[in-house]
Image (cartoon, grey):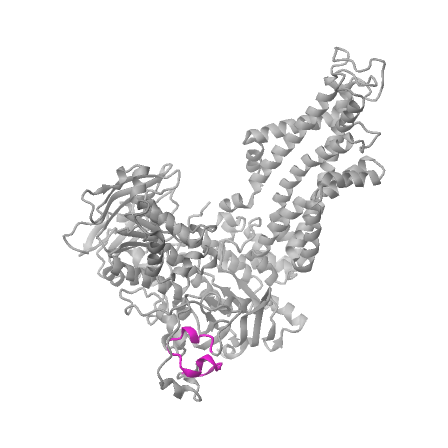
């Protein structure tokens, strides 16, 4: 596909901040990313790493503190471009029980985007039926139901239908299956992939499930404390991680085969508070491979690995990598 | 399993009913001392209800029947849990069997410090003065890798991972021989999950605990358990060693469930998902309950398949087991497999 | 709400049945009171403070008017004032609660401050001050009660809106580019409406009581007979010391019964729309 290489959305140094009494937490801390047309881009990381804030920043659901969002070559600083974006990018959310208005019927829910965007009402019925059919819900059976008459999987299908009805170019999926059972999860993932194929849709898939991201995504960006620490092709990033954090995440995934390659020592401690991030590399207090300047030098995303893969780790910085041969510093246990 | 040794827990024909329909419908379980058994299945399959009925903690409106015999080490007479009254069960709970709930935030008292919640659990089963509560609390917290200072905090001051560790330490307060953990890692993300699973494994080794781990995450079971039982619509449809069930599943449900799970390093193209959803408990299908969703369903499936041994230490409730190969077939039409709608 | 649910709500408990029956009784009394009243309620006679007899079923007042006729006329004032004031109160309370909860920030600080102020100042003295500043009439009475009793509704609606605002369907609408007016109209208000309604029914009870209190203190509309003015007249004419119980007990009993009925209905609604109970079914 020739269009697949063109960026749909470009993020340039995007920052999202949350302010409280006497502190500023940078939930997203200078992220530059390319989400290309027709591709599935995965954003993975622990909860609190900023992946959901990133999605909300892209859609201007929270006003970005810094940086630029470019949609198809047009900066979203412009009010008109922002309005156009509302049609072209849609989002679905994690909790299928919160995502639908309990007092609206499925038909009303799926029609809402058309009404809000002022689409000619003569076309509504056909568009709604097409969207419902695309997500595997027979319009005749489901259009007049209320959310409480649907299962979790069916609710998530309705949410997807409502996101599709405007025929967007990009769909942001914030942990869309993490609250669903395994067999329902597989069904929803299947629906997303089929729609993507049929409608040439780009997906931004936010998840903490690395195996799901690996099987679903074309490319993956790994986030830690508001920053992208590694990105590249999904198979490369997950199968040959170049950043110690990605390595640790992959190792922590329970494997559905007996023995699962033996249990590895999981990462100790927890994600630090984004309001008081550690100095230097944010990951250094938990890093099993940290060395001398890691607590002082902020690593940049640099090429690592054979193909198009980037990692923000001094191990890949020719200027510092030499020092890594020195004995590693002891890892502090952040849990106390 | 320790062949020849006495099982720690034997459950036969466990049934839990509400009104005229069964949520758990004839479950048999047996657990050796120190063994880890995984109980897996979709939500609504009856796995949590099974766990609660082992503790006789079912909510009002649910009735249980069936025999449950516990042989705690060091206790000469077996305990017939099914004959115990509520008062009798209080002696068993926490001392012999304890429970780690899902959602640690809700099971810790928000207005009392962690210390005082430990004191309560410890004093419940030890005569006053026989143990130093403060010292014991510190010991328990250390067992789960937490500093004693945690005891002075409130639940909301702890992270999700710390709260789950506190819950596990509380479960250990009276030295039980069996811990039942219901989705202990579901609310945690992958790193915390790995930490908690590693902790459970270490505790089993150190304390010789038996564990019943309930989860819908087959990956978690594969890494933690010795044996697993797969539940579907209130019944166990397959059980065996983790090795045998994961490598060579013998029930179409298990087979399909495993095929739809992505495994890093395996095939990235996933098999088609199982169509439809679990049946409505008020209108269970006749015969094999998985048949409406099963691509291999045949006229034989109108009869109820019994759970029987199809390979050494591996049983399945399927008329066609043992399966030597899985022929490619088409899924049943979606109309026949409509998801049950919860009301 | 479906018809079946509404039926269960109103008739499924003794509170509902009692409240509905008593309220219906007084509403009929307010509508047909004039028609069935045996005398002109304001017509005086020489038969002063006469005990109940076949001529005057509930006796007469200090000016010789028929107590039963006054009682029938008073029902209309109580019902009209109660409902009209409650509607004003609901509109103010819901608006303040919606805006304050939905917009947050400075809007919230100002409106919530106002709400707190109305919540803590003693309502009755405020009503007394307001109604003595304005010339007493039925309209003034309704307005005064309405603008002094909305604070509770405002508070409850605000907290409900605070949780609704965070629900994913609101975020979804925002992601679509829906405006604030649209979101409040389609997503916030319909979900807060049952709560507003239940609260308004409770306010009806408060308003009826307030009207009686103001009238009793002589701040009611002097041209209209209400149960409050009846009590006022009874006390200023020393009816209690004359042991004219027929003059005091009927209006007192009517006020108590009507307020009780409306309050029971209100609590019944509140029980039904309590977000915690709703969660289980949704």
Where is residue C136? Give x, y as percent.
Answer: 83, 36
| Towards the viewer: C198 or C155 | C155
Please indicate whether residue C213 sits to the left or right of residue B201 in the image: right
Residue A198's place in the image compared with B285, above or below, is below
The quarter of the displayed image where residue C231 is located: top right
Please indicate whether residue C62 sits to the left or right of residue B290 in the image: right
Q: Say whether residue C58 is visible.
A: yes
Magenta part mainly helix, strand or loop?
loop
Task: Residue at 39% x, 38% y: name it.
Answer: B61
Q: Say whether residue A307 is visible.
A: no
Task: Residue at 54% x, 32% y: name it.
Answer: C12
Please indicate whether residue B95 sits to the left or right of residue A66 in the image: left
Where is residue A120? Give x, y as percent.
Answer: 65, 60
A274 is within the stretch colored magenta: no
What span is colored magenta in the figure? A281-304
Task: Residue at 61% x, 72% y: name it.
Answer: A65
Task: Residue at 60% x, 59% y: name it.
Answer: C173
The quarter of the displayed image where residue B251 is located: bottom left
How many circles with numbers are drawn on the protein? 0
Where is residue A309? Give x, y as percent.
Answer: 43, 81
| Towards the viewer: B254 or A279 | A279
The residue most toward the top is C54
A287 is within the stretch colored magenta: yes
């Amino acid at each position: 596909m020739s269009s697949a290489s063109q960026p749909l959305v470009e993020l340039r140094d995007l920052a999202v901040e949350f302010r409280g009494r006497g502190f500023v937490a940078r939930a997203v801390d200078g992220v530059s990313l390319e989400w290309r047309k027709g591709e599935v881009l995965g954003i993975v990381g622990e909860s609190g790493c900023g992946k959901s804030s990133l999605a909300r920043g892209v859609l201007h659901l929270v006003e970005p503190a810094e940086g630029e969002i470019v949609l198809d070559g047009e900066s979203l600083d412009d009010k008109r471009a922002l309005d156009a974006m509302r049609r072209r990018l849609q989002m679905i959310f994690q909790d299928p029980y919160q995502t639908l208005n309990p007092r609206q019927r499925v038909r009303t829910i799926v029609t809402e985007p058309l009404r809000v965007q002022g689409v000619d009402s003569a076309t509504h019925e056909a568009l709604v039926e097409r969207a419902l059919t695309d997500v595997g819900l027979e319009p005749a059976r489901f259009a007049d139901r209320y959310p409480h008459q649907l299962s979790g999987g069916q609710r998530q299908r309705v949410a997807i239908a409502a996101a599709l009805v405007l025929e967007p170019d990009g769909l942001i999926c914030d942990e869309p299956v993490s609250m669903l059972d395994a067999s329902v999860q597989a069904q929803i993932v299947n629906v997303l992939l089929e729609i993507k194929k049929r409608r040439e849709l780009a997906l931004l898939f936010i998840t903490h499930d690395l195996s799901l991201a690996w099987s679903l995504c074309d490319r993956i960006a790994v986030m830690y404390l508001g920053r992208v620490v590694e990105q590249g092709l999904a198979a490369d990033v997950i199968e040959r991680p170049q950043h110690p954090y990605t390595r640790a995440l992959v190792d922590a995934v329970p494997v559905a085969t007996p023995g699962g390659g033996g249990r590895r020592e999981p990462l100790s401690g927890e994600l630090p508070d984004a309001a008081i991030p550690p100095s230097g590399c944010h990951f250094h207090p938990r890093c099993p491979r940290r060395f001398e300047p890691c607590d002082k030098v902020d690593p940049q995303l640099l090429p690592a690995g054979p193909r198009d893969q980037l990692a923000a780790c001094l191990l890949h910085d020719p200027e510092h990598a030499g020092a890594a041969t020195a004995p590693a510093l002891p890892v502090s246990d952040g849990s106390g | 399993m320790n062949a020849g040794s006495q099982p720690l827990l034997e459950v036969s024909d466990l049934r839990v009913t509400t009104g005229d329909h069964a949520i758990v419908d004839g479950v048999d379980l047996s657990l050796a001392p120190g063994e880890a058994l995984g109980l897996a299945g979709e939500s609504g399959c009856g796995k949590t209800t099974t766990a609660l009925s082992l503790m006789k903690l079912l909510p009002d409106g649910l009735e249980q029947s069936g025999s449950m015999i516990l042989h705690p080490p060091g206790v000469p007479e077996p305990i017939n849990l099914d004959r115990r009254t509520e008062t009798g069960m209080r002696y068993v709970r926490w001392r012999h069997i304890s429970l780690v709930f899902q959602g640690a935030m809700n099971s810790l008292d928000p207005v009392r410090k962690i210390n005082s919640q430990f004191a309560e659990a410890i004093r419940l089963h030890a005569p006053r003065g026989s143990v130093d509560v403060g010292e014991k609390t510190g010991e328990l917290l250390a067992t789960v890798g937490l500093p004693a200072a945690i005891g002075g905090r409130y639940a909301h001051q702890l992270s999700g991972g710390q709260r789950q560790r506190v819950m596990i330490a509380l479960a250990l307060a009276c030295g039980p021989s069996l811990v039942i953990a219901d989705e202990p890692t579901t609310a945690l993300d992958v790193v915390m999950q790995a930490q908690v699973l590693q902790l459970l494994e270490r505790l089993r080794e150190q304390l010789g605990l038996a564990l019943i781990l309930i989860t819908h995450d087959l990956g978690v079971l594969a890494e933690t358990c010795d044996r697993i039982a797969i539940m579907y619509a209130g019944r166990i449809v397959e059980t065996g060693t983790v090795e045998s069930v994961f490598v060579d599943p013998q029930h179409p449900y298990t087979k399909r469930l495993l095929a739809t799970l992505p495994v890093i390093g395996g095939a990235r193209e996933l098999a088609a998902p199982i169509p439809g959803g679990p049946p409505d408990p008020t209108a269970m299908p006749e015969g094999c309950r998985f048949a409406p969703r099963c691509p291999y369903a045949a006229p034989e499936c109108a009869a109820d398949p019994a759970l029987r041994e199809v390979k050494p230490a591996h049983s399945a409730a399927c008329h066609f087991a043992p399966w030597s190969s899985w022929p490619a077939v088409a899924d049943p039409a979606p109309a026949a497999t409509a998801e049950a709608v919860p009301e | 709400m479906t018809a079946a649910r509404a039926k269960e709500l109103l008739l499924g408990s003794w509170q509902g049945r009692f409240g509905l029956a008593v309220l219906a009784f007084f509403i009929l009394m307010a509508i047909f009171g004039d028609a069935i009243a045996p005398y002109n309620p304001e017509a005086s006679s020489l038969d002063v403070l006469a005990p109940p007899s076949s001529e005057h079923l509930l006796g007469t007042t200090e000016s010789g008017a028929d107590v039963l006729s006054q009682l029938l006329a008073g029902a209309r004032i109580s019902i009209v004032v109660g409902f009209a004031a409650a509607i004003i109160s609901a509109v103010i309370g819901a608006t303040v609660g919606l805006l304050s909860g939905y917009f947050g920030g400075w809007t919230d600080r100002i409106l919530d401050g106002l709400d707190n102020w109305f919540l803590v100042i003693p309502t009755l003295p405020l009503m007394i001050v307001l109604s003595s500043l304005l010339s007493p009439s039925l309209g003034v009475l309704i307005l005064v009660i309405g603008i002094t009793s909305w604070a509770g509704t405002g508070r409850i609606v605000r907290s409900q809106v605070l949780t609704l605002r965070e629900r994913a369907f609101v975020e979804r609408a925002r992601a679509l580019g829906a405006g604030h007016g649209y979101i409040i109209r389609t997503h916030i208000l319909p979900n807060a409406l049952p709560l507003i309604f239940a609260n308004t029914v409770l306010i009806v009870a408060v308003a009826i009581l307030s009207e009686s209190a103001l009238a009793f203190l002589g701040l009611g509309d002097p041209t209209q007979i209400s149960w409050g003015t009846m009590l006022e007249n009874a006390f200023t004419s020393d009816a209690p010391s004359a042991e004219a119980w027929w003059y005091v007990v009927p209006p007192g009993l009517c006020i108590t019964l009507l307020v009780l009925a409306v309050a029971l209905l209100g609590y019944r609604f509140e029980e039904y729309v309590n977000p915690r109970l709703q969660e289980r079914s949704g």
